[in-house]
């Protein structure tokens, strides 16, 4: 397996994959909790919710996540990109701890450490599986050309 | 053996089947989407040559991409169904963490990715980490 070094632009895409999903989910959660309870009796209230600022930002961030995820999959292996998406969980937990001042249990700290080590393992390795180059067959030389070439010699 | 539930309790095998359905559908969706993006090629290069419209056209005209997205949508509905019967604290960590391992297996078998010892170790570490974090 050859070592495919990522460009800074590609690290940026992976960063967006890890950041956009948890931030989008957080915005959706904040927007939905600010709304009155949505019931099946009034389904149109869900459509109206899409146009509220927090939910709008959340949807835009999730679209950004999917676009960067697809871009990453176009130049890196699935088994390389997926741990980056899981790293989003760590970002959410750190946000919760240092921004929202929520308590994090020792089990969760252990989870953060394991995910970080796991992502570090993959990030140090190759991003793409090396494929053998397709063997291009030489065009067959027609029989009469071979004869002609033989005559010239 | 019963899975503890705050909604209607279901048996162990029913709970396992629901979580297995989420994992199977999600893994199929991820593998199909990854295969679609590999068949399309480097999106950054396509965007450099044909602009953003060209990149979007390349993605939305790929049937494999729609197959992948459809399976991801089915996985989402399977998750919603499971949440009707099982607690979120069981479904979310179990499906999120196990999907990492099944994707590593599927990536090796179907996408022929070189899942070496480094990637196996990472998949298992992240799987346990996600479980601990979300549990």
Image: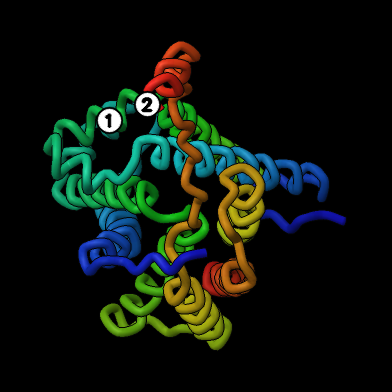
Give residue A23's position: percent from left, percent from top.
28, 61
Q: Quadrant of residue A128?
A: bottom left
Q: Are marks 1 and 2 in contact (CB under 8 Å)?
A: yes
Residue B58, label in figure: 1
Chain that bears disc 1: B
Give residue A117's position: percent from left, percent from top.
50, 81
In this image, B58 relative to A135: left or right? left
In this rendering, does residue B15 appear at all? yes
Which residue is located at x 32 percent, y 62 percent?
A14
Residue B111, label in figure: none
In this image, B19 relative to A90: left or right? right
Residue under label 2: B62
| Color scheme of the displayed model | rainbow
Chain that bears disc 2: B
Q: Are marks 1 and 2 on the same chain?
A: yes
In this image, A118 relative to A56: left or right? right
């Amino acid at each position: 397996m050859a070592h495919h070094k990522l460009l800074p632009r590609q690290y940026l895409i992976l960063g967006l994959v890890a950041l956009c999903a948890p931030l989008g989910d957080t915005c959706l959660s904040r927007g939905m909790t600010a709304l009155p309870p949505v019931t099946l009796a009034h389904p149109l209230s869900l459509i109206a919710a899409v146009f509220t600022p927090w939910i709008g930002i959340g949807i835009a961030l999730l679209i950004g996540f999917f676009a960067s995820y697809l871009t990453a999959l176009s130049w890196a292996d699935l088994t390389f990109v997926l741990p980056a998406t899981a790293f989003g969980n760590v970002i959410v937990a750190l946000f919760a701890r240092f921004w929202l001042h929520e308590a994090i249990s020792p089990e969760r700290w252990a989870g953060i450490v394991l995910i970080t080590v796991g992502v570090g393992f993959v990030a140090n390795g190759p991003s793409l599986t090396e494929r053998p180059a397709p063997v291009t067959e030489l065009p067959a030389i027609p029989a009469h050309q071979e004869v002609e070439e033989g005559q010239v010699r | 053996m019963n899975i503890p539930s705050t909604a209607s309790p279901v048996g162990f095998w029913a709970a396992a089947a629901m979580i297995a359905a989420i994992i199977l559908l999600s893994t199929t969706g991820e593998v199909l989407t990854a295969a679609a993006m590999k068949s399309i090629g480097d999106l950054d290069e396509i965007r450099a040559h044909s602009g953003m419209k060209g990149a979007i056209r390349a993605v939305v005209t790929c049937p494999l991409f729609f197959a992948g997205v459809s399976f991801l949508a089915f996985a989402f509905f399977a998750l919603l169904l499971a949440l009707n019967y099982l607690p979120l604290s069981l479904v979310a960590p179990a499906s999120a963490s196990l999907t990492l391992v099944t994707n590593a297996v599927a990536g090796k078998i179907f996408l022929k990715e070189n899942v070496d010892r480094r990637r196996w170790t990472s998949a298992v570490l992240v799987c346990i980490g996600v479980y601990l974090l979300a549990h």
